[in-house]
Image (cartoon, helix red, strand yellow):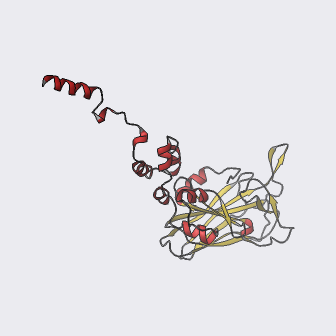
Amino acid sequence: MGANASSSIDSTQNGLSNPLSKSKKLEDIPEACVALVLSYLNPPEICMMARINRAFHAASSADFIWESKLPSNYKYILEKLLGLSVTGMRKKDIFAKLSRSNSFDGGTKEIWIDRNNGGVCLAICSKGMRITGIDDRRYWNYISTDESRFQTVAYLQQMWWLEVDGDLEFQFPVGTYSLFFRLQLGRVTKRLGRRVCNSDHVHGWDIKPAQFQLTTSNDERAISRCYLDNVGTWIHHHVGDFVVEDPTIMTKIRFSLTQIDCTHTKGGLCVDSVLVCPISLAEVLRSSDSLIVTK
């Protein structure tokens, strides 16, 4: 009996009958468990974890992970704005598609989602706005530049009356959003590969402030005023914020930039675009204004 007991112990120590003696690897974790863990991470973290091994890579493609990262209106964006069908598309592929800039409305608008939190962002170019006097080359010109995501900005040479306005109707997810005008004083060119700002036409902005205004179909209104002084630097001028409580209805916003004091002329202004983004991104945006905007 003692011999049998000794034999049993030896076989256990040799790992012949003890399942705990087998080494466990990451590949042995059930894919469903890995996917559940990944669902608590943000998209960049999920992509990093997917590089660990094949099991993590396979789990990272689960639809339930990526659907939770998508904005609630992703079907509206794909089908109504971009004319695409969501049928048969994996949620991971939808996220990848929407995290890149997508143009619509004749190329005058772009939409994308933030890669970290799925927040919806929209941009409206100068050609998508109404600009008083834009058809008169004595006052305004469209100039090409790689410093705009739309590759074109409206440039004011000189005028007594500045009025730029536009509107947007969109089905926003629930949240608070900020609206900005992206502006610059001076016309930028490249000389011998260097960035050079021509400020010859810049004048009149230190006499009276420019006025920015925002109104929404929910009866929200915001007005702000400031003197423009950002010669050679692109700045996102904050117009105001608005709140969306019902994601199932269309929200219409109107925005404007004016300086209609006719006692003096003003000129040398570049109007690039209007940006709408979640308020959580607003502070990041204002602290990271750059000369080059990349898609």
Considering only vertical position in the picture, is 225 above or below 60?
Answer: below
| The quarter of the displayed image where residue 11 is located | top left
Q: Could you say where residue 20 lies in the image, as x and y percent from the top left?
A: 30, 35
Give the quarter of the figure containing the C terminus: bottom right
Q: Could you say where residue 117 lies in the image, as x and y percent from the top left?
A: 51, 55
At x 36%, y 33%, the residue is 23
Considering only vertical position in the picture, is 85 above or below 270?
Answer: below
At x 79%, y 59%, the residue is 268
Q: Nearer the viewer, residue 219 or 206?
A: 219
Q: Could you say where residue 168 lies in the image, as x and y percent from the top left?
A: 63, 72
| The quarter of the displayed image where residue 10 is located | top left
Q: Could you say where residue 69 lies in the image, as x and y percent from the top left?
A: 50, 58
Using the rendered image of the protein, determine whether residue 125 is visible from the camera's viewpoint. yes
* Left or right, 259 with reference to 283: right
Q: Nearer the viewer, residue 179 or 33?
A: 33
Using the rendered image of the protein, determine whether residue 260 is visible from the camera's viewpoint. no
Q: Nearer the viewer, residue 227 or 106?
A: 106
Q: Nearer the viewer, residue 252 or 103?
A: 103
Q: How many marks?
A: 0
| The quarter of the displayed image where residue 6 is located | top left
Give the quarter of the figure containing the N terminus: top left
Considering only vertical position in the picture, is 25 above or below 41?
Answer: above
> Furthest-left residue in view?
1
